[in-house]
Amino acid sequence: MATPLDRLAFVASQRARIGWFFGQKLLAARMSRPVPLPARLRQRLQGRPVADRRRILADLLALFEQDWRNIEAGWYAPPRDGLGSPSAALRRTIDFFADLAAVEARRQGAAKERLIETPPAGTYPPYYLQKFHFQSDGYLSRASAERYDHQVEVLFGGGAAAMRRQALVPLRQALVAAAGRRPGDRPRLLDLACGTGSFLREVKTNWPRLDVTGLDLSAYYLEVAQRNLRPWSRVRLVEGAAETMPFAEGEFDVVTAIYLFHELPPRVRRSVVREIGRVLRPHGTLILVDSLQTGDDPDYDAMLDSFPALLHEPFYASYLREDLDRLLGPGFTPAGRVRAYFSKVLSYRRAPD
């Protein structure tokens, strides 16, 4: 049971996290030049409300308050690693700022500089050969995999891990439901586009004996995931695409997709939904964590509209317009929806056959 001292420690560690990453976010912004927005986008943004820094920080603090309430209620354990060792945190920060000049040149450069022209050996779908977020090498290098988690935390001012953790609430509910349907049969979870394994690490911290599988297209990110998940058994990491999964029909009780859908072209998004319906058991649960969409919070709409240009998110605009309930219907029934700062957590039940 959580004590006042536990809360004090949690608040102190998360305030330190915000100070560390939000400070880097502000410094990186000062070191970068404004990106010239397309004329049509500038027109669309004129006169629209925009969440200011005070509002954004208030929403970030509200996320951590929600995070604590979940911990206090016993939905999941408190985060254990904080910022990690000071030397490692400093090393990651130096690396982030050392790479910033290349990111800035790409942001200001020609469109061709945002594509990976000579990918490493392997077969990758064309949509994947992008330097998403203007990051060096896209998702296809060891350096990118080592840098990614820090970059994302800076982008969200220290709130990325906490946003992901909100998915642990519907996950606990899904695991209880799966155990009730098939007593004695161990549930299985599939995490799509698992990346460096950050979400699976939270999962295994809370359910160390759960069978988990991570699927990702990048062998480099899977190497980091392997290292992050080394303390636990019953972990399988597979290199592959979410639109052509190498898994059996009905193999999983839960499928999670954390920040995947906004990085997929509309056609591929639909292929992924079909594959989820194939590998997820009847009555199983799909849990999505992804960006807010247009209309979720009007004060954020202008910011969301500018993301594709500011962050090189080539398929993000189509995601903003996507009706996720319609995309997933009729095979899935909405089961939960929670706001989490810049993100939302959605859960769906797979219809019976």
Image: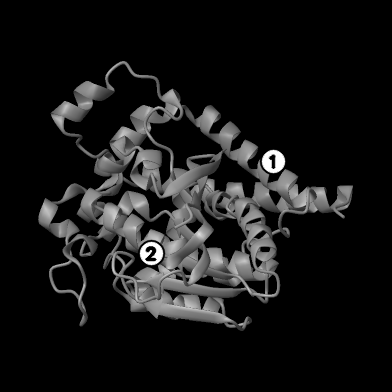
Query: In the drawing, what numbered circle is on residue 166?
Result: none
Mark 2 → mark 1, Cα distance in angstroms = 37 Å
The residue lying toward the viewer, choosing from 35 and 307, is: 307
The residue type indicated by label 1 comes to Glu
**Residue sitting at x 62%, y 62%:** 83
Residue 307 % position (x, y): 31, 40
Residue 236 % position (x, y): 49, 80
Circle 2 SS class = helix
Q: Mark 1 points at which residue?
A: 65
Query: Callout 1: few (<14), some (14-19), or many (20+) C-alpha neighbours within 10 Å?
Result: some
Circle 1 SS class = helix
Query: Callout 2: few (<14), some (14-19), or many (20+) C-alpha neighbours within 10 Å?
Result: some
Position of residue 83 in the picture relative to residue 244 (left or right): right
Please state, as top left, top right, bottom left or bottom right, where the N terminus lies in the image.
Answer: bottom right
The residue type indicated by label 2 comes to Arg
Please state, as top left, top right, bottom left or bottom right, where the C terminus lies in the image.
Answer: bottom left
The residue lying toward the viewer, choosing from 190 and 89, is: 190
Query: In the drawing, what numbered circle is on residue 278?
Result: 2
Position of residue 157 in the picture relative to residue 318 (left or right): right
**Residue sitting at x 50%, y 31%:** 53
The residue lying toward the viewer, choosing from 236 and 278, is: 278
Mark 2 or 1: in front is: 2
The residue lying toward the viewer, choosing from 40 and 150, is: 40
Can residue 37 be seen here? yes
